[in-house]
Image (tube, grey):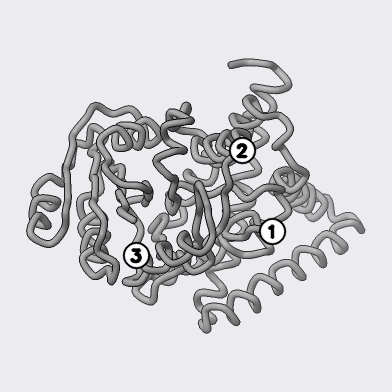
Amino acid sequence: MFFSIIIPLYNRPQEVDELLYTLTLQTYTRFEVLVIEDGSKLDAREIVESYKDKLDIHYFYKKNEGQGFTRNFAFGHAKGDYFIMFDSDCLIPVDYLEEVSRYLLQHHLDAYGGPDAAHTSFTPIQKAISYSMTSPFTTGGIRGNNKNLGGQYHPRSFNMGISRKVWEATGGFILTRLGEDIEFSIRIHSMGFKIGLIPNAVVYHKRRTDFLQFYRQIHFFGRARINIYKYFPSTLKLVHFFPALFTIFLIFTLLMNALNTQLAGICNLFLALFILMIFFHSWSVNKSARVAFLSIIAAFIQLTAYGLGFMQDFWKRIILKRS
C-alpha cells in the first residue's frame, strides 16, 4: 500500500520541520509527503526543500482558503492508495505507518482515525492540555474511542486517513472550517463507507502552547458543533450540551457564593469533587503533580470555552436563525 501524507500549513515553519523529521524515521517507507502552504506569510519552502534527499516530498503554495479546502487541493495531487492527514503540530511515532498498514491489511476500513497523546518533550502546559482533550471527565470519551457517548466514531483531521475511493466518491471537504472534519466523517458514514479507530495509530499532538491560545481554539470548537448541527441535526447529542451546562453551573455557583446562600455549599462540594477527580486522574496518567494541577486549569478552560462558543452560536444560529 502506498500512502500520501497530507499536511496543510499556515505560518508554522518550525512545527512542520519537527513533523517532517519524525517522518524520516518511519519504519514503513512506501509513502509521499505533500505540504500545502495555505497562503502563509511565514512560508516553509526552504525547510521543506531541505528534506528532498530524505523524503519523497512535494511543496505547494496556494491562496488562503482554510484547512478543509487545502486538503482537497492536496487530494487532487496525491498519488497514494490511501491519503493520511496530519496537523502540522503533530509528531509521528516511528512505527505509525507500519501499524496503519498492518491494521488495514487485516481489517478493511475506508477511513480511519487514531488517538493522540502527549510526548515526553511537551511542556507541562501542553501535557495538561493533552490530558484535558482526552480525559473522560471533559470530553466524555468522544475523542480517540470507537465506543463513546457521542454515537458513531468520527475521526478528527489531525490524525485521519481515507482511501482514494472515499475521496473520489465524496469530493472531499465541503466545509473548510468550523467542524469540517466531523461533517466529512458523517458524510462518509452516510455513503455506506466503513470508518474505524486504529488504536495503535497514535500521534503526539502539541495543540496549543498556552492557555489563551487553547481557549480561543476550544471556543471555536464549540461554535463548530452548531455549524455541524445545521447540516446534520440528528448528530447533536446530549453529551454535546455538557460543557454549556457546566458553564451555566459554574456561573450559578459564583452567583450563589456572592449572595452567600445555602446552595453555595452544595455547589462548592460538587466543584471540589470534580477538581479532585481531575487532579488525581491526571496525576495517575502523567505522573506529575504539576501537570495534574495545570490539568484542572485546562479542564475548566476547555469546558467553559466550548460551552460559551456552543451557547453563542446556538443562540445566534438556532434561536435567532441568523446565518
Name the residue located 82 percent from the left edge and 67 percent from the top edge.
269
In the rendered image, which residue does mark 2 sit on? 192
- Mark 1 → mark 3, Cα distance in angstroms: 24 Å
Query: In the rendered view, does 86 fall on the left or right side of 189?
Result: left
- Is label 1 in a helix, a strand or a loop? loop
Query: Can residue 236 be seen in the rendering of this structure?
Result: yes
Question: Which mark is drawn over residue 93?
Answer: none
Residue 3 at x, y percent in the picture = 32, 52
Question: Which mark is drawn over residue 92?
Answer: 3
Query: In the rendered view, does 20 fall on the left or right side of 97?
Result: left
Name the residue located 47 percent from the left edge and 28 percent from the top edge.
175
Amino acid tagged 2: Gly
Name the residue located 46 percent from the left edge and 62 percent from the top edge.
105
Viewer-nearest residue: 283 or 194: 194
Viewer-nearest residue: 268 or 101: 101
Question: Which mark is drawn over residue 147?
Answer: 1
Q: Is residue 136 above or below residue 286?
A: above
Q: Residues within 10 Å of mark 1 (few under 14, many from 20)?
A: few
Work out whether mark 1 precedes mark 3 in sequence or the reverse, and give the earlier one: 3
Residue 186 at x, y percent in the picture = 60, 37
Amino acid tagged 3: Ile
Amino acid tagged 1: Lys
Name the residue located 74 percent from the left edge and 33 percent from the top edge.
234
- Is label 3 in a helix, a strand or a loop? loop
Work out whether mark 2 precedes mark 1 in sequence or the reverse, and give the earlier one: 1
- Mark 2 → mark 1, Cα distance in angstroms: 19 Å
Viewer-nearest residue: 277 or 17: 17
Q: Residues within 10 Å of mark 2 (few under 14, many from 20)?
A: few
Q: Residue furthest right?
A: 262
Work out whether mark 2 precedes mark 3 in sequence or the reverse, and give the earlier one: 3
